[in-house]
Image: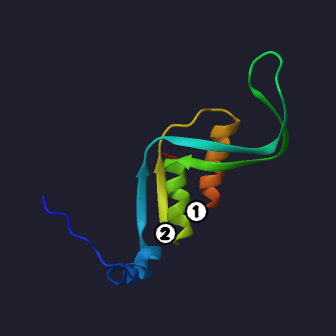
Amino acid sequence: MKIRKYDRQELLPALDFFPEARVLVVGDVMMDQFIWGRVGRISPEAPVPVVDVDREEFLLGGAANVVRNIASLGGGCDLVGVVGDDQMGRRVIRDVAELGGDAAG
């Protein structure tokens, strides 16, 4: 099988049509958690750092991150995957809906 290489200038015009696209994303859905802070000491119970948390951030991960990327380019999409019936699962569904995606699948 021969793989064709595309030139950047050849692909850029395709972005003009991206807002008309509707993409189905199927895959593992997750919520990524980022914790920022400072390590002040090592725990005496185990050799692990103890973090003084400054802030936390939650971002769509896995297939849900693909949805976020498509939305950032102006495209629409629907997400099919599995999430739990818990706080993070509901948050994934809410965040996907805020991007204009349908997470009913």
Whole-angstrom CA distance, mark 1 to mark 2, is 9 Å
Residue at the spot of label 1: 100
Residue 18 occupies quadrant? bottom left
In the picture, the disc for residue 39 is none
Q: Residues within 10 Å of mark 2 (few under 14, many from 20)?
A: many
Q: Amino acid at mark 2?
A: Gly
The residue carrying mark 2 is 75
Q: Residues within 10 Å of mark 1 (few under 14, many from 20)?
A: some
- Amino acid on which the number 1 mark rests in the picture: Gly
Q: Is residue 105 left or right of residue 92?
A: left
Which element carries disc 1, helix, strand or loop? loop
Residue 103 visible within the image: no
Q: Earlier in the sequence, mark 1 or mark 2?
A: 2
Q: Where residue 5 sits: x, y (%)? A: 25, 71
* The quarter of the displayed image where residue 12 is located: bottom left
Whether residue 90 sits left or right of residue 7 in the image: it is right
Q: Nearer the viewer, residue 88 or 53?
A: 53
* 81 horizontally vs 92: left or right: left
